Image (cartoon, rainbow, N blue to C red):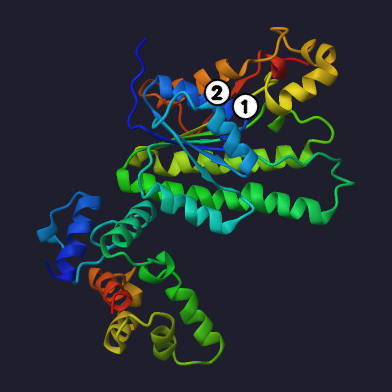
Amino acid sequence: MQLTFSGQRALILGGSCDLGICLAKEMIQEALYPILTFRFKAGRERIEKALEPFPGRWEAVRFDFADAVSLNLLFAHLREDLDFLVDLAQGDLEGLVASVEEDEFRPYFLQNISSRAEMLKRAARVFLGKRSGRLIFISSAAAERASAGQGFYAAAKLASEALYRSLGLELGGRGITTLTLRPGYIDAGRGRRYLQSREKEALGRVPIRRALTEKEVARSVVFFLSDTARGFNATQIVMDGGLTAGK
Amino acid sequence: MGLLEKISGVLADILDVEASDIEAETYLIRDLNVESIDMLEIAVSLNAAFNIKVSENDIFLRNLRPYLIEAEDKGQAQAPCLVEKFPFLTPDRVQEILADLDSGPVLKVKDLAGFVAYQTR
């Protein structure tokens, strides 16, 4: 199957993580032009090192949900020209609902929900000008089936999913569609660190008995960005090897 | 191209109607059946066309009726209150609006032109 795409410029929020970099490489293979965001210098360096073999086919720009100025700079950088958005940006906050301090969860929700809404508003208005846009939010299988200690993370993910869903509902008629992908265990980044400590126990509950690779998630995202997949709108798809289907 | 003509062009493009059918006195909601998503698109297009910040609450007179209720609650005259809240409306236009309230949504194409003229003054 030959995939076709409506546009080329694809913003990857949270682009310096393993999945973000893998996704950028897959995009470049499909002649898309990834624009990866990073928060810190180390992230920029990771991106530069990994994408060095593809000069002129990508760019990196700083963006942090915790920094309102960076949102303005990001959109000034984009100059109203964007076709796709893949949102991998997510802060982590683990702790029991009854124990996490207020001064931890307040900024967490502000950054991961309110700032995301602000970013989405800006992006949607760029897409509206073009009457075309495709947005994919990378959520998590834990959004709906959170473990103890993941309450704040799940709350932020579900709230963000609702924003993406509503956007696809409201602007689908204007060529702007959204999709949430909920991956399960991925052998990359945070998931890899978790699996290293609890691999047998965690994967024993996954019907396919293995974690997802970053490559299969990245390739799925590329498919969901394609014209073929635009009918998946304002909904969420679970990609977890069957983890959350059973008890 | 005049301001009104440019705005009519924007509206015609978004609403898929003939620009020649749009006049200063045309009502957006009553005549052109503009919905909230159209308003969002109109705001984005005017922002791009005139390089101005477009507050949807202001340009579409969104809080007109709540402001009138607020004025009544505070025992204030309605007209000066509206002039203060929507400085791009002339006192004459405010009087027109107050007389027209019972017939439905009052927003007209000339109000958009007034907003744009005020923002680019």
Q: Tell me the distance, in whole angstroms, between the alpha carbons under discs 2 and 1.
A: 6 Å
Amino acid, disc 2? Cys
Say if residue B20 shows up in the picture: yes
Q: Secondary structure at mark 2?
A: helix
Please determine whether, in this image, residue B80 is positioned above or below residue A94. below
Tags 2 and 1 on a common chain: yes
Image location (x, y in percent) of residue A95? 84, 40
The chain that hosts pointer 2 is A
Disc 1 marks a residue whose amino acid type is Asp
Q: Position of residue B60 (x, y in %)?
A: 36, 67
- Mark 1 neighbour density, 10 Å: few (under 14) some (14–19) many (20 or more): some
Task: Assess whether mark 1 and mark 2 are in contact (beta carbons under 8 angstroms).
Answer: yes
Residue that numbered label 2 is attached to: A22
Residue B103, given in percent of the width and then of the height, sits at: 31, 72
Q: Quadrant of the C terminus of chain A?
A: top right
Badge count: 2
Q: Residues within 10 Å of mark 2 (few under 14, many from 20)?
A: many
- Residue A18, disc: 1
Q: Position of residue A115 (x, y in %)?
A: 59, 52
Residue at the extreme top of the image, as rendered: A208
